[in-house]
Amino acid sequence: MAKCNGFLYTVREGDTIVSIARRHNIKLAELIVANSNIYDPTKLFPGQEVCIPRGKSQGNGLPQGKGTKQAVDPELGVQLPAGYRIKIHVEDLTFPTGITFSDVGEMYVVESGYRAGSVSEPARVLRVYPDGSTGEITRGFLPPVTGVTWYNDSLYVSESGYPGQITRVFPDGTRETVINNLPTGGDHQLSHVVFGPDGLMYFGIGTVTNSGVVGPDNRWLNKRPRFHDIPCRNYELVGQNFVSEDVLTPEIGDTAVAGAFQPFGTSTKPDEVVRSKFPCTGAIYQANPDGSGMKVFADGVRNPLGLGFSPGGSLFATDNGMDVRGSRPVADAWDTFEEIHFGEWYGWPDYNARIPVTDPRFKPDDGPQPQFLIRNQPPLAEGPVALFEPHSVPTKFDFSTGTEFGYRGEAFVALFGHIDHMGEPLAEPAGFKVVRVNIETGEVNDFMVILDPRNAGNGPVHPIQARFCPCTGRLYVVDFGQMGDTGGPPKRKSGAIWEISR
């Protein structure tokens, strides 16, 4: 271990890097930097030594996690805590991305219209009946549809094509556009819509690119060669240019693109200022239910796939870290669980989990150390609340609020999962589970684990949402299904909704 400029703390059962930072009143980023010898701080083990930098006060101890007995369902290939049961609730769905419940407990599900290989179905909203059968409400949305939410006797649907929009669907299937001309259609899409205790609408728009620079990894580039990320603030750029010798494979009727790529779609001369525009990318928005009064609530997020409010009324989001790809690859970036506050900046594209991309952790094996793009960086938000291992792909989540199901107050987060990343197999599959997050300590524990993602069999494949029914308290897990990345080909009607009870 490198010399510690402070004192050593011995990890206890249930400790996480987040809970240790909070216990010792130190910023998470500072603690991670002080322990750069620990390759993956998300996987601490009892007895391991962590350096607490000098000058940081020690706080009060926080509750520690306790071991939980696990049980395996061999037929479904799923592990759950002992005493919990899982069963199929709805089957034969094609690439579903979300469910919601009406005020009287009626379930609705959305099929995304996503295309995997030659497999696709129209984007549509279905009502789920008590026996698990479905009936179509309406179809023909702009795919991919990334979520559905019930509010005020109607459904709000997130359409993430180009450009994106939010559509209100009434019980009779008629609909109206609430917000349109959103800058989607790049690498990342809209989140689902959520409504806060204040009665306002919240949603996220992901970034167009991986790390701020358009490059040959952007599959949409042939169709939209002038498309790029849009900053939410006026940024003074450091002055980097990125040159790629790769030529994109053109689609029929398209022109191949190659050459120089610049951050935020502009030539980057030193001290050049890129002006903000509205709406911008990599941000979370607030609006009235009718779409009026839309404004940026927070920015500097990359891919906030899931949003939700805690029982205490705070807004939380999942965020997906940067990848080793494109003209500005970033290695080993964590996925995060964030508490979102108005006006705060969460660090993209120059930070991951509030650690600067200039940290050696983020250097690709065969590429240069990433450097800052922005000279006048805004103050960083605190956090994150919790870390997930890289490429877990955290998506949608919900909070346990009842006593019967257990783990009251904890967030249940779906981790979609990766086996291969950018064509390279991971040492171990990342994600493919539902985890519990203690928002006070940052502790992350497995809840539903897919034991062999390469051979999921009869069980779930890609969890994309965890959602509690407000009427029964049961947990429902939306399974995206076979998209061709887990050993078999893409499969129509392989998606499902799973019910977990105690």
Image (spheres, rainbow, N blue to C red):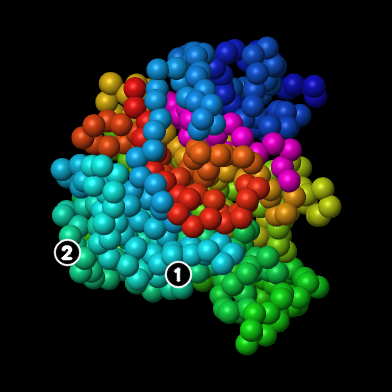
Q: Residue shown at 39%/58% (left/top)? A: 111
Instruction: Indicate which disc, 1 or 2, sits on the residue closer to the N terminus.
Output: 1
Q: Residue shown at 52%/45% (left/top)? A: 462
Does 501 appear in magenta?
Answer: no
Q: Percent position (x, y) of residue 319?
A: 51, 47
Q: Residue shown at 70%/16% (left/top)? A: 49
- Callout 2 amino acid: Asp
Secondary element at tag 1 = loop
Would you say 273 lies left or right of 427 here?
left
**136, above or below 241, in the image:** above
Task: Rate crowding at label 2 as few (under 14), some (14 to 19) or many (20 or more) other CA atoms within 10 Å.
Answer: few
For the residue pair 469 and 343, the one nearer the viewer reads as 469
Give the number of the mark in front: 1 or 2.
2
Q: Percent position (x, y) of residue 135?
A: 26, 57
Give the quarter of the image for residue 260.
bottom right
For the residue pair 124 and 55, the one nearer the viewer reads as 124
For the residue pair 218 and 427, the one nearer the viewer reads as 427
Label 1: which residue? Answer: 161
**54, above or below 484, in the image:** above
Label 2: which residue? Answer: 172
Q: Residue shown at 69%/48% (left/top)? A: 420
- Callout 1 amino acid: Gly
Predominant secondary structure, magenta span = strand
**364, above or below 84, in the image:** below
Task: Rate crowding at label 1 as few (under 14), some (14 to 19) or many (20 or more) other CA atoms within 10 Å.
Answer: many
Residue range (magenta): 425-452
The residue most toward the right is: 366
Q: Image quadrant for the C terminus?
A: top left
